[in-house]
Image: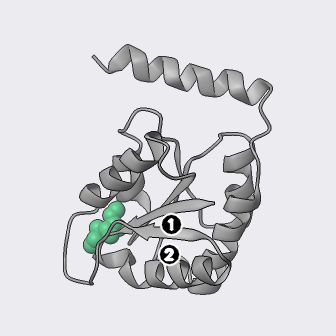
Amino acid sequence: MKIAIGSDHGGFELKSEVIKHLEENGLEVEDFGAYSTESCDYSDFAEKVAKEVVNKNFDFGILICGTGIGIGIAANKVPGIRAALCSDTFSAHACREHNNANILTMGARVIGKGLALDIVDTFLNSKFEGGRHQRRIDKIAEIENKYNK
Ligand code: RB5
């Protein structure tokens, strides 16, 4: 499984822990920045990772900022991205099973390392259930098409 990961300065340290964890578990990870805790703009890294995921160069994306909110809002502007902010493991499997989320976002100022790694594992090990959930996702795509002119 190939993972594209990104953060702003607020998520840099937690991102480093997530990368280490994923590599220790044999996953292929590419870091699209930021590469330090120097102040930067989360939208830049959201777009880079989102582009890689919609272009199918990676199976999933992981984005981390201070809250996980800004970076997720930005990623969700890319058509085809379904970025889900998770601060608990229930949401981490539900967003895969029901929403077919393709990017996980987390807030480094919201959750600790232990929970973050559990959320990552839960997200990556959960599968989309399809069925009625596919119909709902198709309707999200219809909204994108309607407003992306
Ligand atoms: C950066 O200070 C902070 O605003 C950012 O990491 C994030 O929390 C925004 O949503």
Q: Position of residue 101 (x, y in %)?
A: 60, 46
Marks 2,1: beta carbons within 8 A = yes
Q: Position of residue 97 (x, y in %)?
A: 75, 45
Q: Quadrant of residue 43?
A: bottom left
Camera-nearest residue between 8 and 107: 8
Image side of residue 43 versus residue 117, left or right: left
Residue identifier under label 2: 110
Q: Secondary structure at mark 1?
A: strand
Q: Which residue is found at the position 62% from the left and 71% from the top? A: 27
Q: Position of residue 85 (x, y in %)?
A: 53, 57
Image side of residue 3 versus residue 136, left or right: left
Residue identifier under label 1: 106
Q: Quadrant of residue 79?
A: top left
Q: Position of residue 1 (x, y in %)?
A: 63, 60
Classify the position of the C terminus by image quarter.
top left
Of badges 2 and 1, nearer the viewer stands 1
The colour scheme used here is one colour
Q: Is residue 136 above or below residue 125?
A: above
Asked whether mark 1 and ligand 1 are closer than 8 Å, the reply comes as no
